Image: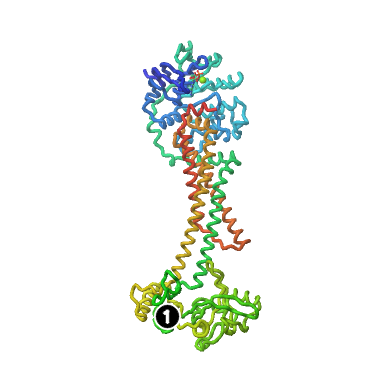
Amino acid sequence: MSGLLEVIDVHRTYQIGDSTVQALRGVSVTIERGEFVAIMGPSGSGKSSLLQILGLLDNPDSGEYRILGQNVNTLSEDEQAGLRNNVAGFVFQQFHLLKRMNIVDNVRLPYIYSGIKGHFRKEAIARLAQVGLEKRIDHTPNQLSGGEQQRVAIARALVRDPLIIFADEPTGNLDSKNSAEIMKILKGLNEEGKTVIMVTHENEIAAYAGRVITMRDGVIVSDERRPGAALSAAVSGDMSFDAHAARNVAIWQDGRYSVFMAQAFQAILANKMRSFLSVLGILVGVASVIAMMALGEGAKASMEEQLKSMGSNMLSVRAGSAKIRGAAQGAGAVARFTFPDVDEIASRRDLVKNAAGVVNGAGRIVYGNKNWSTSLSGVGYDYGTMRAVTPTVGRWFTREEIQQREKVAIIGVTVVKQLFDNTNPIGKTIKINRINFTVIGIAPAKGFSGQQDEDDVAIIPVTTAMYRVLGRTYLSGIFVEVTSPGLIGQAKDIISSQIRKRHRLKADDDSFNIRDMTEIQQMLSSTTETMSLLLGAIAAISLVVGGIGIMNIMLVSVTERTREIGLRKAIGACRNDIMLQFLVESVSMTISGGFIGIVLGVGISLILSFFAGWAVKTSIISIVLATVFSAMTGMFFGLWPARKAAELKPVEALRYE
Ligand code: ADP
Ligand code: MG
């Protein structure tokens, strides 16, 4: 006849450093269904070792163990966990209740690992009523006496309605009155049909059992059934159990995931200060990234705005090679543009909206006793609208003024500041390169473009500049406004071939170049790209640093909760359950750090734009990225601690002090 539990010649040795302890040295025993067995013997005789093997918390080094007819050697770690969850209930000397949770949550804990959906609050309360604690359901373990705590532990052991109750010195920490109560409960359970296997070294406690096995030095020295102690009457029914099938529920299918979430928040909130400090790294990292990205985006947007105002369908044809911009390279190397060139370009009405010749030079301006050197531009009529320099104060040149080589000037605000001390310059006479000019307008302020002050200019008619001031017969370049930005490329090609034809240039001649704003745009966007890259690097570093902080705290947390992990494994948690629990915890921490960081980052950028007047633009992408990355940080840095937790052996974890 094969029993409920059957141990054959089991050995178990422990290795502590160099020495080995032989805890079990060939133990064979069979336990029938419905028995109440007490395992007795002096301290260190191997009682607990045997009970742990019987309860699947530990596996023998050699020998065979059959539970419910199944050879334990063929079961995987997780299958054993499933068996524990379904057929075993544990009661320990130290109770092993989870202090953070109230007693209802403690009692229903085994259900999380059962693969069955539901809340099981009713079941938990029913079990608590069975041990006389129905009035204490809102209490936490710390608010209960030792005896009451042990009764909660018994309720937890019973909640999955197990076949077998394993109890290791269940009354070891209790006074005699509480001990008697606990023993009465166990006795009652046995009478209802549960198999009870209990370790004790006290005779009064063993007296409740119907069978006493005595151990000494790792072997059984006596095994007595008490006269008159019958097997429990309630023994009946099917006692087969397929451990392989019981483990086939995917973690996501039952309600486990949401329970882990809830427990993660419980654990995080149980250590508020510590959790906050550990997410601080993530928080600061995410906040600064959001704020910096907002600043970067703002800068980029305002730059693009400026570019747009300059016209994105603008071409600039300059003499000289592209490498040496506008500078002469000696005779023959520079195309000499004249007004017929401008006219020819302007004649392509299908592509060209406007064309204006410009000549650039240096200008020395004198007004009263002040003088100022600035850059001088001689421009055509259409230049004003094309480059958006039509004055808002004063006026633009007339066509006649340009034709007649009139001595009228429009000056930039920097020049106004330098020469006029901010008094109105309109109508005043200034000298440009010793020639008298009348100021007719102030060019709209443009600010800086890189190092260059765009407002440090004097603009005069192109004819005046060429023939009266600079003494040149050639233009420095031609500005072309293409009818639409999409035609830029085509216009470039046409204009280029026009010029080559007129000037009889070879195809590879580089005596002129045509630039468009897209080039400048590309240059600027490559600058902002570098900036984004830099910000990205800072983000990565801060997230790594934050992640290390999280990992550190999770390792502490795993160590601190070793016994909790042991208990969870004892009641049926498999490796993935433990792993997931800690991963959910670290990811919750990093995500909440990320969220606070986002709020803070957005707040900082708003404050910067409000008080410092900086252009900011918070992008959805940066928020999404921050969230994703902080979650990934939690995942990555939580993995190792979570694995460490998952790999703990139930017995060792439970013994951890
Ligand atoms: P009992 O429960 O009868 O007091 P145990 O089964 O706990 O005895 O232990 C039997 C022997 O094995 C003791 O000498 C004990 O020190 C040793 N032992 C038990 N568990 C471990 C362990 N995890 N590591 C090392 N030695 C252990
Ligand atoms: Mg013991």
Q: Which residue is mark 1?
A: 337
Q: How many marks?
A: 1
Q: Quadrant of the N terminus?
A: top left
Ligand 1 neighbours mark 1 (CB distance < 8 Å): no
- Asked if residue 194 can be seen in this view, the reply is no
In the shown orientation, is residue 71 left or right of residue 113? left
Q: Quadrant of the C terminus?
A: top right
| Image quadrant in which you'd find residue 236 | top left
Is 488 in front, or is 62? 488
Q: Residues within 10 Å of mark 1 (few under 14, many from 20)?
A: many
The relative height of residue 137 versus residue 298 in the rendered view (above or below) is above
Is 429 in front, or is 287? 429
The relative height of residue 390 versus residue 594 in the rendered view (above or below) is below
| Residue 502 placement (x, y as % from top left) | 36, 81
Q: Residue furthest front?
A: 330
The relative height of residue 295 versus residue 629 in the rendered view (above or below) is below
| Image quadrant in which you'd find residue 408 | bottom right
Is 507 in front, or is 446? 507
Is 301 in front, or is 164? 301
| Residue 45 placement (x, y as % from top left) | 49, 16
The relative height of residue 359 versus residue 562 in the rendered view (above or below) is below
Colouring scheme, one of rainbow, by chain, secondary structure, one colour:
rainbow
Report the amino acid beneath label 1.
Phe
- Residue shown at 60%/76% (left/top)? 372
- Asked if residue 558 can be seen in this view, the reply is yes
Q: Secondary structure at mark 1?
A: loop
| Residue 219 placement (x, y as % from top left) | 44, 14
| Residue 464 placement (x, y as % from top left) | 52, 85
